[in-house]
Amino acid sequence: MNATTTESDLRVTPEAPVPPSPDSVLEHGRYFTSLPREYYLDEERFKSEVDRVWCEQWVYAGHVSQIPRPGDYFILNMQDESLIITRSSATEINAFHNVCRHRGLRLCQESKGHFGPRIVCPYHTWSYGRDGTLHKATRMTDGEFFDYADWGLAKAHVSVWQGFIFVSMAEKAPAPVSSMIDAKTNADMEMIEPLRMKVAVEKIYEADANWKLLLENGVECYHCPSVHPEFCVSLDASAMADYYAEDYLPNLVQGLIIPVKGELESLSMDGRYLSKKLLGKFGEGTPIPYAFGTGFMTQPGYAWGGFHPDYGMVASTLPVSAGRSIMICQWFVHEDAVEGVDYDVEEMIKIWDITNHQDLAIQERQQLGVSGRRYVPGPNSPSQEPGIHSALRKYLEMMGEPY
Ligand code: FES
Ligand SMILES: [Fe+2]
């Protein structure tokens, strides 16, 4: 106590934080909240989240257009895991753990590339087929000490839906992504023909914030009018909020809508198209449904994709530590769209780039606030933030904690 503190000062000190109800950290009688502060700070919890959530769920990895030819690959790094996403043949996509089965070398260091007929480890030159089977262990004959058949590259599960590649490191694969997507999203996606898209540009953002803050922010549009004035020029923010209130599901992957204001063409700074070459059937004259915007999301580990008649964007968050996350964003255009003719990269990314920076700046400020010892989570809006309730219940369920 310092010399000037009096007993009456002590009496007006705010009361200690309200303890959570014994049933769940989210439920508080008439209202629900987000999670207690230590859930966003604790490194031990973070490690357990990587095991129980991130390695179990479907994680968005990329798009088939990134690996058009057999042998093409790209790398997905997630925390201390690394996966090689590769096209093993015309019809087979695999996700191999990026680890040699001999003495554990990380096989690929480049973020993308092309394998010849063999995947060769540079340490002792063990070589694997494109399908991951061990082809040759140098100077150790098959069957002499061990059987090659037992020592192929370890695989993660892969689910490809509409050309989007999802991976899971779970022992048992979750249900296929296609089984989790509703009929309307499938029909809307078919209109833009995702198999005929390409990644025009990719950008990586970093944030000093826990991944769950990015998730919570992503499943509500309560903040859209105050944080995203540019975004709200073309987004129908109230229809977006209604989606989270009415159609949001607690599935690992789900379809969604991202409605633009009816009189506008696309989600952009001025509501006009960002690529002249429209996607899929729209480029062939099929009428565009009112306020068209379709997409998908994963949870609790959060990825989010939104597509309009001319372009799309997928933002995939990945965990780094309790206080740090990254977000990888890909912008999609028609496979025949020509940069500088049909679209300009800087113009195309502008609306989402501004919006992403706004969101991540908010999450960093929120991480600072949540870190304060006095923070207890406040009541969330049942009409504006129900997505948070569903997403965090899913999180607690996967963590094996009461929800
Ligand atoms: S670690 Fe790969 S061949 Fe030895
Ligand atoms: Fe936002």
Image (spheres, helix red, strand yellow):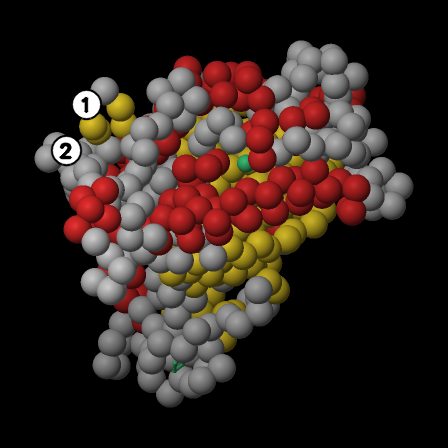
41 or 156: nearer the viewer: 41
Q: Is residue 127 above or below residue 360?
A: below
Task: Label 2, secondary structure: give it.
Answer: loop
User: Is 221 displayed left or right of 54 in the figure?
Assistant: right
Q: Dividing the image into four equal quarters, which quarter contains ligand 1?
A: bottom left
Q: Residue at x 61, y 64 (%)?
A: 113
Q: Position of residue 220 (x, y in %)?
A: 46, 29
Task: Tell me the amino acid under the disc marked 1.
Answer: Gly
Q: Residue at x 32, y 56 (%)?
A: 41
Earlier sequence position, callout 2 versus callout 1: 2
Q: Residue at x 69, y 50 (%)?
A: 201
Marks 2 and 1, how far apart in space?
8 Å
The residue singled out by tag 1 in the image is: 29
Q: Position of residue 210 (x, y in %)?
A: 40, 52
Discs 2, 1 touching: Cβ within 8 Å: yes
The residue singled out by tag 2 in the image is: 21
Quadrant holding the N terminus: bottom left
- Residue 343, by quadrant, is top right
- For ligand 2, tell me if the residue under mark 1 lies within 8 Å: no
* Residue 136 at least partly seen: no
User: Is 196 displayed left or right of 123 in the figure?
Assistant: right
229 or 243: nearer the viewer: 229
Task: Tell me the amino acid under the disc marked 2.
Answer: Ser
* Residue 19 at least partly seen: yes
Q: Position of residue 340 (x, y in %)?
A: 87, 45
Task: Label 1, secondary structure: give it.
Answer: loop
